Amino acid sequence: MQLSELTASKKLACPACGGEAQWNPAKKALVCAFCGTESPYEVKTSGEIVEHDLVAALKAIPKDARGWQDERRSVRCQHCQAISTFTAAQQGKACDFCGSTSLVPFEETGDIIRPESLLPFEVNEPSARDKLRQWYKSRFWAPNNLGGKALTDTVKGVYLPYWTFDADVNASYRAEGGEYYQNQKGEREVRWFPVSGQVQHFFDDTLVCGSKGVHPSLVEAVEPFPTSSERLKPYDPGYLSGWTVERYQLDLVASAQRGRERMTDAIQQMCAQDIRADTHRNLQVSPSFDRQTFKHVLLPIWMVGYRYGAKDYQVVVNGATGQVAGEYPKSWVKIALAVIAALVVLYIFMSLQGGR
């Protein structure tokens, strides 16, 4: 596997005040968070997005694909175990994922595989806040003070580590197909017969998230991300300036296995749909995988992590599409009132029925 060469980043400082410039999704430029001055630094906006041979990569990963190519420091959260990386100018006093202040330095061992491409933030912070407020307001069963507890002003922009996998899958299958019919008593029965067939499908950018900081169900709920070569940008530290990046904790080997499992589940469903019968049983699928490739990419989310009572909750916004998913506490008062109201309605209904 031959990875493309990436230029080492310069210190992305504001030319006016010396503060750190941050990538601004609205202006699509580096803008100083302190004085608002646009930086003359130009991020890489075009270039080939390479798909790498998966089999060859699993055998040997070259050393020149490692590291972030800029000065970053890493910390591990002792509460949720997420590993976040910051630029030298950032002050990470609390975990962006759970809000815990129990952060300890994390020493990189040099085994971090640098992403070659990323999807820049397209949803800006004000839009993310609006979407979060709308989401909070639509949670009927949530406590009335949830908006105040969750505090949308604690929203953080984070790049999550993702692996994408492509494969050409050819699957042969065998099963028993069933045909419904009515017996002489008018009862429905099934007539079974052997079936077989073959299904071919090309999987493009099957996503596997390498994050530990975001709850898996939320990540899946805001997928997919637009990861086509037209939308992804070649890796450039400028896009990450001022943003938190989570280091992957699901490595290439484990991610490749999970990606294959997802493809296998999908191809089994395709085989089941291919069976021309009313029902089926004992489906056996034998898939073969060819032209397997992968990419390591960074994908953007906005998120709020908060604690309510004794439990941690998260709400996330897809930084490219604006899709929202989240967790929230349920108000026992609202639930109790709803149960009482339902019982009252049931009592009235039964009384009216009994009076007839």
Image: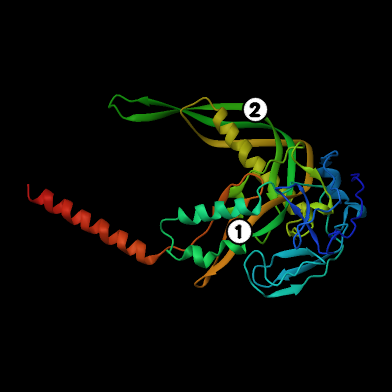
Give percent across and percent down for residue 185: 27, 27
- Other residues around mark 1 within 10 Å, as few (<14) / some (14–19) / many (≥20): some
Image quarter where the N terminus lies is top right
Q: Amino acid at mark 2?
A: Gln
Nearest to viewer (mark 1 / mark 2): 1
Give the answer, above or below, for where 158 lies relative to 105.
Answer: above
Q: CA distance from mark 1 to mark 2?
A: 36 Å
Label 1 is placed on what type of residue?
His
Residue at the (50%, 29%) spot, across then down: 177
x, y (%) of residue 237?
A: 83, 54
Residue 44 in the figure: left or right of residue 133: right
Mark 2, secondary structure of its residue: strand
Per the image, label 1 sits on a secondary structure element best described as loop
Q: Earlier in the sequence, mark 1 or mark 2?
A: 2
Residue 122 in the figure: left or right of residue 152: right
Q: Is residue 226 above or below residue 343?
A: above
Residue underneath mark 1: 215
Disc ID at residue 24: none
Residue to which mark 2 is pinned: 198
